[in-house]
Image (cartoon, rainbow, N blue to C red):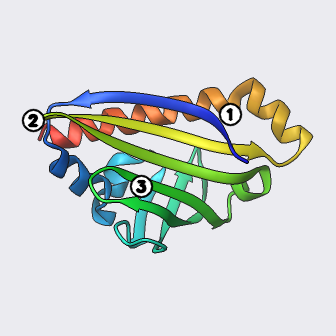
Amino acid sequence: MSKLQARNELVVNAPIDRVWALITDIKQLHLVNPGVVSAHGTMNQLNGTRTCEMSNNGKKGTMTERLIELEPFRKTVWTVVEDSMGMSKMLNNTRFCFYLEKVSEHRTKIINESYYQPATIFASVLNALMMKRTMGKIHGQILSNIQTVLSK
């Protein structure tokens, strides 16, 4: 069973359908998710996959994820299928989630959560020392990026 490792939320001044359109648009993923250089695949089809070309702190690679839960205008849940950067060797049972809640006609609450289980003792130590905090910072940046894109 995966454990909640990071959770961030933000209310944006945009209707839920506009937020949904952004978080399920493969062509805009690089604008939202830090580290993504480009992506191809699908982001709005249950069991669909997306493959992202990544660049994190000078390290380049790819990550393929599968959309394992989809509730239109409410929820997406992704899991890592494979990657060339080592995440799948360090983390088991990954779940990267977006939840949307309508606050009003023109305001939406976005919740971004990450669930995983460290795969090794070394990964558990790294998780306690830095990975959870880093994941929280990434979530914060994703939400900030969403807000920026929606404000244009």
Q: Which mark is residue 131?
A: 1
Q: Mark 2 and mark 1 in contact? Answer it, CB < 8 Å.
A: no
Quarter placement of the C terminus:
top left
Q: Where is residue 27 in the image (x, y as percent from the top left)?
A: 29, 64
Q: Distance between the residues labelled 1 and 3?
A: 22 Å
The kind of residue tagged 1 is Met
Query: Disc 1 or disc 3, which is closer to the eye?
Result: 3
Q: Where is residue 28 in the image (x, y as percent from the top left)?
A: 29, 58
Q: Name the residue under label 3.
A: 76
Q: Position of residue 103 (x, y in %)?
A: 19, 31
Label 3, residues with CA under 10 Å away: few <14, some 14-19, many ≥20: many
Q: Which of marks 2 and 3 is nearer the N terminus?
A: 3
Look at the numbered disc 3 and give the secondary structure of its residue.
strand
In-front residue for pair 37/50: 50
Q: Name the residue under label 2.
A: 106
The kind of residue tagged 2 is His
Look at the numbered disc 2 and give the secondary structure of its residue.
loop
Task: Say which residue appears at 45% left-offset and 74% top-offset.
Answer: 48
